[in-house]
Image: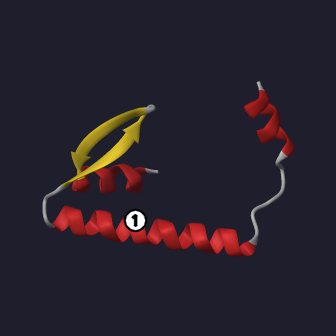
Amino acid sequence: MKKLRDRQMNKKQPSKMAKDGLKCLRKAVREEVEKKALLNQYVIISRNGKTCRVLAKEALKITKDR
């Protein structure tokens, strides 16, 4: 119950620095997944709250669909 209340109270928008940091992290992760796809390697992702091992190529397809 406390977590829900905390989330509801925190309605401030992230700062520009936080948004830039998130954008940078997303780009870095995407680049690493693309490298793994070229090497035919696996990545660990979360699907419906469960940890799954999938080919990086498949993970890239999943993100392109969104």
Q: Nearer the viewer, residue 27 or 4?
A: 4
Helix, strand or loop for disc 1: helix
What residue is rendered at 48% in x and 65% in y?
26
Residue 56: x and y in percent read: 24, 55
Q: Amino acid at mark 1?
A: Val
What residue is rendered at 17% in x and 67% in y?
38
Residue 11: x and y in percent read: 83, 50
Where on the picture, by quarter, is residue 3?
Answer: top right
Q: Nearer the viewer, residue 6 or 26?
A: 6
Query: Which residue extends farthest left?
Result: 40
Query: Which residue extends farthest top?
Result: 1
Query: Which image quarter holds the N terminus?
Result: top right
Residue 24: x and y in percent read: 52, 73
Report whether 8 appears left or right of 26.
right
What residue is rendered at 46% in x and 51% in y?
66
Q: Which residue is mark 1?
A: 29
Q: Is residue 9 above or below residue 16?
A: above
What residue is rendered at 45% in x and 71% in y?
27
Question: What coloring was used for the rendering?
Answer: secondary structure
Report whether 52 appears left or right of 20.
left
Residue 42: x and y in percent read: 20, 52
Categorize mark 1 by other alpha carbons within 10 Å: few (<14), some (14-19), many (20+).
few
Query: Which residue extends farthest front?
Result: 2
Q: Is residue 3 above or below residue 27?
A: above
Task: Count the marks.
Answer: 1
